[in-house]
Image (cartoon, grey):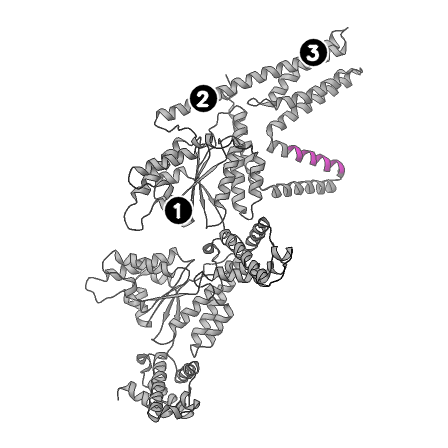
Amino acid sequence: MRESSRARPAGRAAARDLFEQVRLGYFRLSPPLRRLIYVAVLAGAVALAFGLGWSVLNTFFGTLALLGFAALTLSFPRAAATLLVVLAWLATILIVQGASGASSPIPTALMILGLLVAGAAHLIRWVPPWVTTVMALVPAGLTAVLLGVVVTGFVPAVAIWAAYAVAAGVLVYRFLQARRVRGALEAGERHQTGLRVREGGHLAPAQGAGERDAPPPISVEEALGELDAMIGLAPVKEQVRSIAASIEAARLRREAGYSTEPPMRHFVFVGPPGTGKTSVARTVAKIFYAFGLLETPYVVEAQRADLVGEFLGATAIKTNELVDRALGGVLFVDEAYSLINSGDGQPDRFGAEAVQTLLKRAEDDRDRLIVILAGYEKEMSAFLSSNPGLGSRFSSRVRFPSYAPDELLQITELLQRRRGDRMAPEAAPALLARFEDIHRRAIVDDLGNARFVRSLVEAVAQARDVRVVGAGGAPTTEDLVTTVEGDVVKAFDEITARYRGYQAAPSLEEALADLDRMAGLEPVKRQVHAIAAQLRVAKMRQERGLPTPPQMRHFVFAGPPGTGKTTVARILGRIFAALGLLAQPDVVEAQRADLVGQHLGATAIKTNELVDRALGGVLFVDEAYSLVNSGYSGGDAFGAEAVQTLLKRAEDDRDRLVIILAGYEKEMSAFLSSNPGLGSRFNQRVLFPSYAPGELTEIAVLLADSSGDRFDDDARRDLAEVFTWVCDEGLIDGLGNGRFARSLFERAAMRRDVRLAALGGATASAADLTTITSADLRAAVDELAGK
């Protein structure tokens, strides 16, 4: 009976489990961290020796030896156990030799025998090598002692050869025993496979294996070295190393005689596009292949179209054929969430059939296949929650982060080296600054991370070729392979110009300067400056790893009409974009009609479509209080549906969207109190005051300046009188504040044009064509007043 079948003492099993847990934690540490721990322990031991007056040299080498043995034990526990046996064997020989005092070649020969037996024992797999070493050395040593010491008259050479022969006989016996153990394990696996087939599992031949060339031999170290050579992806590398450590621990337990299930599993790779998910999938395939858990290191890549058929029933056939082609290796399904396509409001029966077939094969062929589902994190979470079987069978999730600016630069240089190109010294800092800009704007994922870099490298090479050929003459070899700063800037601008809103995003200083140039609104300006400062400090804290409270992302703009709410909303969008909190500064303006549908159910769809259009920027809902219309006797079900949908999206997409609700102060207060969720999510209120007469005059003058016109002195005095009168009479809010100033300027400019046309415009001077007089202004006032 094998050792794995015998009952073990509970204490021994517990100790072994504890040791395996320690080993697993050890391998989860990165190699640099392990070396740092060794150095810290060694330094601590030397410091302790200084403090206690011990021999520093002896302490140093003693600690070094213990650390070496600890590393050997954690990395190769079988080798560490064999080393202890060999050390005990050598110590015993030295003690016996010292006690006897006789000079004989036998002790030396036995020492050499111990090393040879230990090496041979490690070549015999499926049985513990340290047990093999003990079983070979003990009878060999007794034979040598019996023939060379106890029985007189024997030549030492005879005793040595007899000891070697005994050790060789034991090694042969252990080799035969290891073959029987391996045969029993394989028979058990075939029996379990047969059970799966009889229960309806698939045992299709590995069709692709016969057609491909024989896979090349790959070691675990080579596979992990390929992973470490990838740029960035530090958390992914740590997670894959942990997987490799788990596989190694399972292998060691199995070789020690413990019955273990093959450590096969299926994975979910989540993260933005262009972050190396496919490359890491190939490395995972090589790791499992190197451990002997897969027949090939090949990856079959697929998308929805490769699994879904044209009619019900064909999907199962198509998915089974795809899985059969991937058997023995890895099946990588990119954008797996597209298998559940509910965009038209109807269940996706074709995708559901593909998912069910894939789940069955993932379970039936789990010993011959690894399935990796990949896609964006949010969509993949929804996809996994759509079917309970997905979450249980695909429980290992690997998250891929976006590339940092310096990592994007390293990828650029790597791709250029592969092309035989190189970057001029001044071009690298310019490119890094641009990578930092797209990272600050949080659009690196939308651009595609490494995919964007690949397109950029090709565009930069094209810009260089155009420059070199256009310069004429005979270019040097250096000119043909070197990209300069101008090439990088031109290519980068061309590619990013395709991205909506990229070129338009200003700096924070430009956005705040535009705010300060607005007439009036001093309380609003102070509040927006404070919001910008708070967001800026929060970003600095986040970059330095300090705790950062959640920042306000949604606002209420309350005040009378014509007080600049839409203009300030655009500036706020530019501030968020400049700080990298929004992808672009675009503002999508909406009212009730843009959110509410014609029937229940249509409102949610319409509101979601509007929010989707605004994602990455600002959604500005004017007269938001109209979404709750109390005039309906049975309540405003349509508006309530729009509000609920808007609240949900405001929370779900808070990192990608800013929502501003605007309207009159009194009506907005009533609107916010109608739903508790509104008050909690829109807790930052900006109050817009009515314009004063002087501010209205300034607005009219600014509008005239921007059009190339001017008011003469008499017209300016009339402007001040008109604005003072409407403000004193309390009419300015009804007239629209800044809108009234714009209307008055436009009507006055029109009256001037009519006056000049009646006098014969051919004789008018440039000053006449651009000057608005008092008469023009008074005519405009009379026209607006309906006189």
Up-down relation of residue 713 to residue 650 (above or below): below
Highlighted magenta segment, given as a residue range: 57-69
Q: Which residue is mark 2?
A: 188
Residue 68 located within the stretch drawn in magenta:
yes
Mark 1 vs 2, N-terminal side:
2
Residue 162's disc is 3
* Residue topped by disc 1: 381
Q: Mark 2 belongs to which amino acid?
A: Gly
How far apart are the two marked residues, 2 and 3, measured between alpha carbons?
40 Å
Mark 1–mark 2 Cα distance, whole angstroms, equals 38 Å
Identify whether 605 is placed above or below 269: below
Asked if labels 2 and 1 touch by Cβ distance under 8 angstroms, the answer is no
Q: Counting other residues with Cα less than 10 Å from the Cα at mark 2, is it few (<14), some (14-19), or many (20 or more)?
A: few
Label 1 SS: helix
Task: Indicate the secondary structure of the residue bearing disc 3.
Answer: helix
The quadrant where residue 783 appears: bottom left
Question: Which residue is located at x 58 percent, y 44 percent?
Answer: 229
Q: Is residue 384 visible?
A: no
Q: Main secondary structure of the magenta part?
A: helix
Horizontal and vertical percent for residue 610?
A: 33, 61
